[in-house]
């Protein structure tokens, strides 16, 4: 039981660190955070689109962030190593954040989801799933759910751990919308099958979204 409690506590700390960094590094384009604990140090690696905003002039920003995390989470000798995101289109949190921002501006949700799914698969992803659930229509309408799933996306077993996932909520004027993005990165090896490239459905292959396009239903 003691080991189970420690495992749960470690997960809580990792989750709280992620939430703290999301607020602190919102302008840096935070995608994910990796945490490695050793007897000597706690290595924290935030993956961002703009490393310069994390480091700051002369390292001031990263030093203050390290001190804040040391005090807030009682970490011994934390070290932050910043990594740049290689491809934002393959990062679920960045894709979800972009969808949330567009939904809050009132852009057509179906077109948004189709366009995002197409762009993910065009970057070589083996599979993706995007779900938007909530007040997707006008004031007074019932909550709805929209989902696009392409390629191979395991739902059970060990293979699920190979799928990257992010969940973020949007708050347009009509009510909350939950956005879930799951992506199987290029080159992922599954123990039970080999994944081949898929042809996109015509509706998704032709989807585009213009910035500022009005919502239509």
Image (cartoon, grey):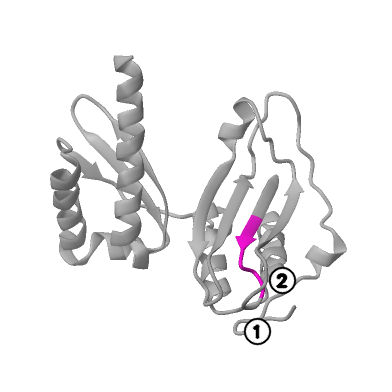
Up-down relation of residue 100 to residue 64 (above or below): below
Q: Is residue 85 left or right of residue 38?
A: right
Up-down relation of residue 199 to residue 77 (above or below): below
Up-down relation of residue 216 to residue 93 (above or below): below
Circle 1 residue:
213
What element does badge 1 sit on?
loop
Residue at image coords 76%, 71%: 207
Residue at image coords 68%, 64%: 113
* Viewer-closest of 183 and 55: 183
Point out the image quarter for the C terminus. bottom right
Q: What separation in Å lies between label 2 and label 1 (alpha carbons)? A: 10 Å
Circle 2 residue:
111
Q: Callout 2 environment at 10 Å: few (<14), some (14 to 19), or many (20+)? A: some
Q: Position of residue 146 (x, y in %)?
A: 71, 60
Q: Position of residue 85 (x, y in %)?
A: 46, 55
Q: Callout 1 environment at 10 Å: few (<14), some (14 to 19), or many (20+)? A: few
Is mark 2 in CB contact (under 8 Å) with mark 1?
Answer: yes
Range covered by the magenta-colored residues: 131-137
Residue at image coords 81%, 48%: 198
From this viewpoint, is residue 124 visible? no
Point out the image quarter for the N terminus. top left
* Viewer-closest of 49 and 97: 97
């Amino acid at each position: 039981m003691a080991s189970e409690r420690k495992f749960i506590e470690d997960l809580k700390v990792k989750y709280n660190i992620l939430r703290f960094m999301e607020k602190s590094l919102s302008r840096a384009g935070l995608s994910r955070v990796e945490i490695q604990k050793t007897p000597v140090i706690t290595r924290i690696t935030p993956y961002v689109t703009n490393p310069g905003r994390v480091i700051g002039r002369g390292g001031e920003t990263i030093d203050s962030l390290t001190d804040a995390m040391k005090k807030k989470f009682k970490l011994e000798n934390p070290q932050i190593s910043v990594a740049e995101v290689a491809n934002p289109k393959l990062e679920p949190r960045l894709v979800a954040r972009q969808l949330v921002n567009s939904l809050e501006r009132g852009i057509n949700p179906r077109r948004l989801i189709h366009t995002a799914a197409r762009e993910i698969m065009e970057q070589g992803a083996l599979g993706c799933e995007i779900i938007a659930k909530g007040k997707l229509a006008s004031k007074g309408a019932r909550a709805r759910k929209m989902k696009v799933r392409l390629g191979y996306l395991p739902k059970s077993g060990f293979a699920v751990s190979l799928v990257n996932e992010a969940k973020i909520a949007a708050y347009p004027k009509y009510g909350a919308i939950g956005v879930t993005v799951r992506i199987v990165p290029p080159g992922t090896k599954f123990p039970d099958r080999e994944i081949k490239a898929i042809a996109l459905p015509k509706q998704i292959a032709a989807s585009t979204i213009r910035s500022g396009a009005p919502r239509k239903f």
